[in-house]
Image (cartoon, rainbow, N blue to C red):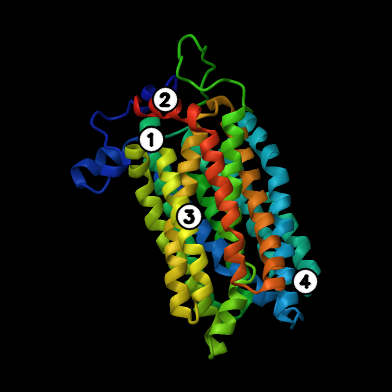
């Protein structure tokens, strides 16, 4: 008989004794009832899709500055500016469409949004393998931005599938799956590009995305729709009104986190290019540095669920922000690739825990019936950071040098701390609700 979700606990009613995600590896005896649990199967399938899709996205796209050089832009500064512009317009297109896709998902289903993001992006990135100029690349990246949005689509479906008391852990695992794909992608993509070229790398990216989109079509189930509940029967539920002060603060935090994370990306490959003598393995070297950041972020995302459950989202976020502010200035002291890899790993530990903590907070300040729209706003925040970060980072690097980008992020991180302080009263009440469930 199909499940009818009337509450988080009702939807969890599957085989008695089903383990939480943190207990999946305890043993075969517990693994079997877990696999028989509908929400566990769905989350596991989406985690696998997250790994493969992020591996695909990071297989060729991080090497865009080097691809721009192959398209005829020889000057390093000009290539960096082109890379920042392309990343910026992509993010603007994605951010503009994210609320639209969020509303569509609430009405027509969240699984369809995952299919749209994966297959649509796969087709467009395949076309990027055939561009002949930076302008053509820019146009296709705009189209890519219109169709993409995998992370928010997956997170929305998971938030409506997993029981509430497991959400912090599940979102941390989902974020870890994302970072795992991001870590593997540059290593494999860099080695592939050194051997077969960047154009072939974009072709492989498109093939992987379309393939995983078809797999989601076959495996993932659409979660049951949750009926509207009155506030008198569920007093702890978030208000039905979507946009309010706390939600806007969460959206602002996500924009800051993404800005800080991606600001150095357009010029980081060019910075590494200046640190290495053997240019024949440049792609592999760039991939290894990016992978070091991704691996550290994976570890951080796995830990953040337990830290959030124990200390609360505010303390977790403050710790991550403090570590990021401590590590950022150290980039100015880097003189070799291995030093850069260490510093970027420490930075990955800081930023890796921020996104799942913010996603968990969003779930508790948004109504379930409007969850797609809420994650659409969060994707817009991601896009604002993803767009503003590369543009500002490339301009600052062109004017003052690449290391100055990491100093420029310090006041932005301080702004995140200010937002957390502004949320203090309402956040404290929300944390007590979270811990009581």
Name the element at disc 2.
loop
Label 2 sits on residue: 3
Name the element at disc 4.
helix
Binning the other alpha carbons within 10 Å of mark 2 as few (below 14), some (14 to 19) or many (20 upward) gives few
Say which residue appears at 38% left-offset and 26% top-offset.
432
Residue 351 is labelled as 3
Q: Along the polypeptide, which appears first: circle 4 or circle 1?
A: 1
Residue 418: x and y in percent read: 55, 42
Viewer-proximal residue among 431 and 187: 431
Residue 402: x and y in percent read: 62, 72
Q: Along the polypeptide, which appears first: circle 1 or circle 3?
A: 1
Label 1 sits on residue: 38
> Contact, CB < 8 Å: mark 4 with mark 1?
no
Quadrant location of the N terminus in the rendered image: top left
> Contact, CB < 8 Å: mark 2 with mark 1?
yes
The alpha-carbon separation of the residues under discs 2 and 4 comes to: 51 Å
Q: Along the polypeptide, which appears first: circle 2 or circle 4?
A: 2
Label 4 sits on residue: 134
Q: Is residue 117 above or below residue 76?
A: above
Say which residue appears at 75% left-offset and 61% top-offset.
140
In front: label 3 or label 2: 3
Residue 343 is labelled as none
Quadrant location of the C terminus in the rendered image: top left
């Amino acid at each position: 008989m199909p499940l009818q979700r009337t509450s988080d606990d009702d939807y969890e009613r599957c085989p008695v004794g089903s383990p939480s995600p943190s207990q999946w590896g305890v043993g075969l005896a517990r693994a079997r009832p877990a696999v028989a649990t509908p929400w566990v199967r769905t989350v596991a399938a989406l985690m696998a899709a997250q790994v493969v899709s992020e591996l695909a996205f990071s297989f060729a796209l991080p090497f865009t500055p080097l691809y721009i050089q192959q398209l005829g832009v020889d000057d390093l500064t000009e290539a960096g500016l082109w890379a920042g512009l392309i990343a910026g317009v992509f993010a603007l297109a994605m951010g503009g469409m994210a609320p639209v896709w969020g509303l569509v998902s609430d009405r027509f289903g969240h699984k369809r949004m995952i299919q749209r993001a994966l297959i649509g992006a796969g087709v467009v990135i395949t076309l990027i393998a055939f561009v002949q100029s930076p302008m053509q690349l820019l146009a296709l990246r705009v189209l890519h931005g219109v169709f993409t949005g995998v992370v928010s689509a997956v997170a929305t479906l998971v938030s409506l599938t997993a029981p509430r008391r497991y959400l912090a852990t599940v979102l941390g695992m989902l974020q870890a799956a994302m970072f795992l794909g991001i870590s593997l992608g540059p290593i494999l993509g860099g080695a592939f590009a050194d051997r077969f070229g960047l154009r072939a790398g974009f072709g492989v990216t498109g093939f992987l995305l379309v393939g995983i989109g078809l797999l989601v079509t076959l495996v993932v189930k659409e979660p049951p729709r949750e009926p509207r509940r009155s506030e008198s029967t569920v007093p702890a539920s978030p208000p039905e009104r979507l946009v309010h002060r706390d939600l806007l603060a969460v959206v602002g935090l996500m924009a800051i986190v993404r800005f800080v994370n991606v600001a150095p990306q357009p010029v980081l490959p060019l910075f590494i290019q200046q640190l290495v003598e053997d240019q024949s393995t440049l792609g592999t070297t760039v991939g290894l540095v990016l992978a070091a950041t991704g691996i550290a972020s994976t570890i951080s995302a796995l830990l953040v669920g337990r830290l959030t459950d124990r200390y609360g989202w505010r303390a977790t976020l403050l710790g991550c922000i403090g570590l990021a502010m401590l590590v950022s200035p150290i980039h100015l002291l880097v003189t070799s690739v291995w030093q850069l890899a260490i510093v970027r790993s420490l930075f990955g530990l800081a930023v890796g825990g921020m996104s799942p903590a913010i996603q968990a907070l969003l779930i508790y300040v948004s109504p379930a019936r409007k969850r797609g729209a809420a994650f659409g706003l969060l994707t817009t925040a991601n896009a604002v950071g993803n767009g503003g970060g590369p543009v500002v980072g490339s301009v600052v690097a062109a004017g003052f040098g690449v290391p100055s980008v990491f100093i420029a992020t310090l006041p932005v991180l301080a702004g995140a701390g200010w937002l957390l302080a502004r949320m203090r009263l309402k956040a404290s009440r929300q944390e007590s609700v979270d811990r009581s469930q």
